[in-house]
């Protein structure tokens, strides 16, 4: 059973790679960003509380995120292996995760850091489009849909995320440096950190991932 954490700057390609790895290794894909966007869309209490933070590119408070992940990790599909995409993002979240794993008798395979230069992530985020219906990820240049504005997979409308606007992108990058880079040091100390050069086409990054972890 394999349990991964995917860490990386916004736009590093965590969601794109997680969708590919999920298919190959049959793992649950647990994206805190997707879970929060679903809560916002459904208008739940959590969604109402999270929306302002997300739109501004700020982190949602630890206690909300930790409770949400704790519940998700107890679901059946997570017992056969998982990818945590976008969590943990603070040292407090990493510590809480260690405790959850211990309680459930689970171990991490690796914390994979997707390494991409800042100018590349800015270009990726500015050109990203996502399907409003199924969440599939596109890029206007790197991975365009067959028909502009329409999802290849489900025919849904493609939109720009509210937090992919320049001001929010800037804030998210600052938060990555201040809050999430210390999480890399946390996993390095535990001997679990693996760095993957991710400034390459998505298929190539995926191939490198499978070479390292796909056995
Ligand atoms: P979240 O949704 O997790 O956003 P993020 O970490 O900023 O990551 P992204 O989804 O923007 O990027 P990605 O690395 O998945 O890249 P993608 O594959 O889409 O979080 C959103 C917000 O929710 C946060 O700001 C925060 O408010 C809140 N939140 C979430 N988790 C939280 C937590 N744990 N604690 C507190 N708050 C939390 O790719 C990007 C683009 O690049 C796409 O267009 C794609 O097509 C393209 N692309 C991907 N790979 C490649 C490649 N190899 N080559 C060329 N183009 C590529």
Image (spheres, rainbow, N blue to C red):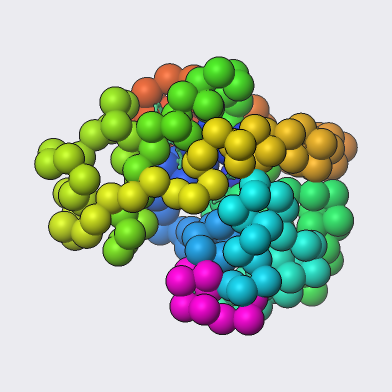
Up-down: is 5 above or below 202? below
Q: Nearer the viewer, residue 144 or 197?
A: 144
Up-down: is 166 above or below 94? above
Residue 48: name its quadrant.
Answer: bottom right
Q: Nearer the viewer, residue 91 or 24?
A: 91
Up-down: is 155 above or below 208? below
Dominant secondary structure of the residues highlighted in magenta in the image: helix
Up-down: is 206 above or below 91? above
Residue at (65% x, 61% y) in the render: 52
Left or right, residue 201 beside residue 154:
right
Q: Is residue 20 visible?
A: no
From the top left corner, tell me how far across and down residue 86 is, in percent. Answer: 61, 50
Which residue lies most toward the front here?
167
Q: Is residue 129 magenta?
A: no
From the top left corner, tell me how far across and down residue 165 is, in percent. Answer: 51, 39
Residue at (40% x, 58% y) in the render: 26
Residue 32: name its quadrant.
Answer: bottom right
Residue stretch in magenta: 38-46
From the top left corner, tell me how far across and down residue 182 is, in percent. Answer: 83, 37
Which residue lies most toward the left here?
147
Left or right, residue 170 beside residue 38:
right
Q: Is residue 42 magenta?
A: yes
From the top left corner, tell me how far across and down residue 163 is, in percent. Answer: 54, 47
Q: Check the picture and name the quadrant holding the N terminus.
A: bottom right
Left or right, residue 105 beside residue 138:
right
């Amino acid at each position: 059973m394999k349990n991964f954490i995917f860490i990386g700057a916004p736009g590093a390609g965590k969601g794109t790679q997680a969708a590919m790895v999920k298919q190959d290794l049959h793992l649950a894909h647990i994206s805190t960003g997707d879970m929060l966007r679903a809560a916002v869309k459904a208008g739940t209490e959590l969604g109402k509380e999270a929306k302002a933070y997300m739109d501004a590119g700020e982190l949602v408070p630890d206690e909300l995120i930790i409770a949400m992940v704790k519940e998700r990790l107890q679901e059946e599909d997570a017992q056969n292996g998982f990818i945590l995409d976008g969590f943990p993002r603070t040292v407090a979240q990493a510590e809480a995760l260690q405790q959850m794993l211990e309680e459930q008798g689970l171990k991490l395979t690796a914390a994979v850091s997707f390494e991409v230069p800042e100018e590349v992530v800015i270009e990726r985020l500015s050109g990203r489009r996502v399907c409003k219906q199924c969440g599939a990820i596109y890029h206007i240049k790197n991975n365009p849909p067959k028909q502009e504005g329409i999802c290849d997979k489900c025919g849904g409308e493609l939109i720009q995320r509210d937090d992919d606007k320049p001001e929010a992108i800037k804030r998210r990058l600052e938060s990555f440096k201040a809050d999430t880079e210390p999480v890399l040091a946390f996993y390095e100390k535990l001997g679990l950190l693996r760095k993957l050069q991710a400034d390459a086409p998505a298929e190539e990054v995926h191939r490198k991932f499978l070479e390292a972890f796909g056995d």
